[in-house]
Image (cartoon, grey):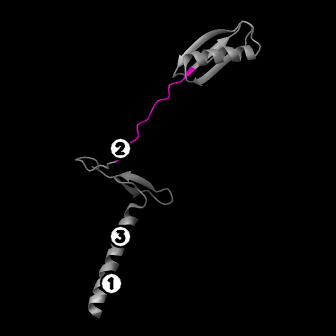
Amino acid sequence: MKLRYLSVLALLFSAAVQAVQAVQAEQGCPDGLYPGGAAPAQICIPVPGYGIGGNTSTAAAPQAAWALTWGAVALSSTGEIGAITGQPSESKAKREALARCAGYGGKDCKLNLAYKNQCVVVV
């Protein structure tokens, strides 16, 4: 009876040690990566060949979505500038640029430029 009890206890201890070693092997790296680098700046390095032949993770990678935004610039003959970026539509960007130009004291503000997903420099 003692022998059976000791053998079951040894088996459980062996399984626990293997589980701890498996957890320590990854050290916080996700599937397909293994720990590398020197402490404290440890990094996760891709496993060579991982993902070839169907051994990939079942989770799909998130798809990035480009945010479509508009900007506009309005100028007056006396030098006031109204510029706006990050607007959801062309018409809203144009309105805001004209309003900013008028807000700075421009009397004859006119739309000079409207653009989508770009940047602009006014000199």
Q: Is residue 121 left or right of residue 27?
A: right
Of residue 62 and residue 31, the one placed in the foreground of this image is 62
105 to 5, vertically: above or below: above
**Residue 23 found in image quarter:** bottom left
- Residue 37 in percent (x, y) is at 44, 56
Q: Is residue 44 above or below residue 110?
A: below
Nearer the observer, disc 2 or disc 3? 2
x, y percent for residue 121: 61, 19
On screen, residue 53 above or below 18: above
Q: CA distance from mark 1 to mark 2?
A: 41 Å
Q: Amino acid at mark 3?
A: Ala
Is 117 left or right of 27, judged from the image as shown? right
Residue at (59, 12) in percent of width and height: 113
- The CA span between labels 3 and 1 is 15 Å
Crowdedness of circle 3 by 10 Å Cα count: few (<14), some, many (20+)? few
Which stretch appears magenta?
59-70
Q: Which residue is mark 1?
A: 9
Q: Main secondary structure of the magenta part?
A: loop
Looking at the image, which residue is at 70% across and 9% down?
A: 76
Percent x, y for residue 97? 65, 16
First-in-chain label (2 vs 3): 3
Within the magenta stretch, is there residue 67? yes
Q: Amino acid at mark 2?
A: Ala
Q: What amino acid type is highlighted by mark number 1?
A: Leu
Residue labelled with disc 3: 19
Query: Quadrant of the rendered structure where residue 28 is?
Result: bottom left
Mark 2, residue position: 60
Q: In screen coordinates, is 49 left or right of 64?
A: left
Residue 69 drawn in magenta = yes
With 108 as the anchor, is 18 left or right in this view? left
